Amino acid sequence: MTDSATRSTTSSAVILLSKGFERGRAKTRLIPTLGPDGALAVHQGLVQRALQTCSPGDRSGDAWDLRCHVDGDPTPLRACLPPGQQATWLPQASGDLGWRMQSALASAHAAGYRYLVLVGSDCPALTREDLGQALAALAHNDFVLAPAEDGGYVLLGSAQPSAWLGAPVFSGARFGGRHALADSLAALTPRGRVARLAVRWDVDDIADVERAREAGLLQPADK
């Protein structure tokens, strides 16, 4: 899983997990309401915002590299990067969400990064400040989680390379529902100190889409 060709130039990396822009594969819970094209448009808007949030930028405090693990063709996502920004593009591992996260974290640690923050593409409320706080928390903790309102979480950080080697860490974790945070905490706590950030919300259903649009975090449907 090691990306040996891309060694770290900083001690920190932000990892973005995302599906590609293939019609009918992303935000499938929105398809009954918005149709496959509408669901894809929401996914594209979320990915664009996530890439803007996660890109290192040119501020001195944004000392991280960006690694994007894409399930699908990464080519259309590259065009969503802000001008002048760079990322390392990698495929996602096969398996459930827990294993895909574990593989991405193991790969980044093996590439030389000490502090890692992993996020998905469906939390438009996540900010650059949240990423910075997570990386700062890892100076004194082994892991960091940002809970979601629905019982899951929107960010997972690691400063513990050995935790992701070997057997699946999240075996039996119930992702996609209200047990995800509790199950993940149960898996991580025996492995080290876990910090928790402020609660955020992500986009799962049409009510979340409208919330994101009203907050100006997602373009209206006619844009």
Image: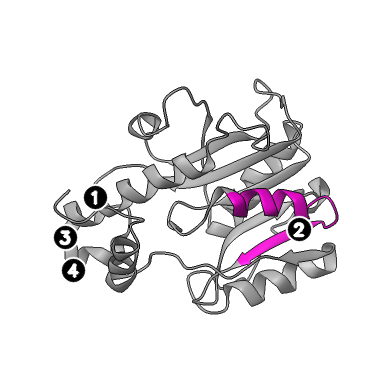
Disc 3 to disc 1, C-alpha distance: 10 Å
135 displayed left or right of 36 = right
Disc nearer the start of the sequence (3/2): 3
Q: Quadrant of the N terminus?
A: top right
The answer to whether residue 147 is seen in the rendering is yes
Q: How is the image coloured?
A: one colour
User: Which amino acid, by three-letter code, is at mark 1?
Assistant: Ala
Q: Which residues are magenta?
A: 129-146
Q: Earlier in the sequence, mark 4 or mark 2?
A: 4
Mark 4 or mark 1, earlier in chain: 4
Mark 2 → mark 1, Cα distance in angstroms:
33 Å
Q: Label 4 sits on what residue type? A: Thr
> What mark, if any, has residue 143 been given in the picture?
2
For the residues labelled 4 and 2, the Cα–Cα distance comes to 37 Å
Q: Are marks 4 and 2 in contact (CB under 8 Å)?
A: no
- Residue identifier under label 1: 41
Task: Please report contact status of discs 3 and 2: CB closer than 8 Å, yes or no.
Answer: no
Residue 123, image x, y percentages: 46, 58
Using a 10 Å C-alpha cutoff, classify the residue at mark 2 as few (fewer than 14 neighbours), some (14 to 19) or many (20 or more).
many
Q: Is the residue marked by circle 3 packed among few (<14), some (14-19), or many (20+) residues within 10 Å?
A: some
Disc number lying in front (3 or 2)? 2
Image coordinates for residue 129, horizontal then vertical, percent: 60, 51
Instruction: Give SS at disc 1.
Output: helix
Residue hosting label 3:
35
* Dot placed on the residue nearer the N-terminal end, 3 or 1: 3
Residue 135: within the magenta? Answer: yes
Label 4 sits on residue? 33
Q: Are marks 3 and 4 in contact (CB under 8 Å)?
A: yes
In this rendering, is residue 170 above or below 133? below
The relative height of residue 87 versus residue 42 in the rendered view (above or below) is above
For badge 2, the amino acid type reads Phe
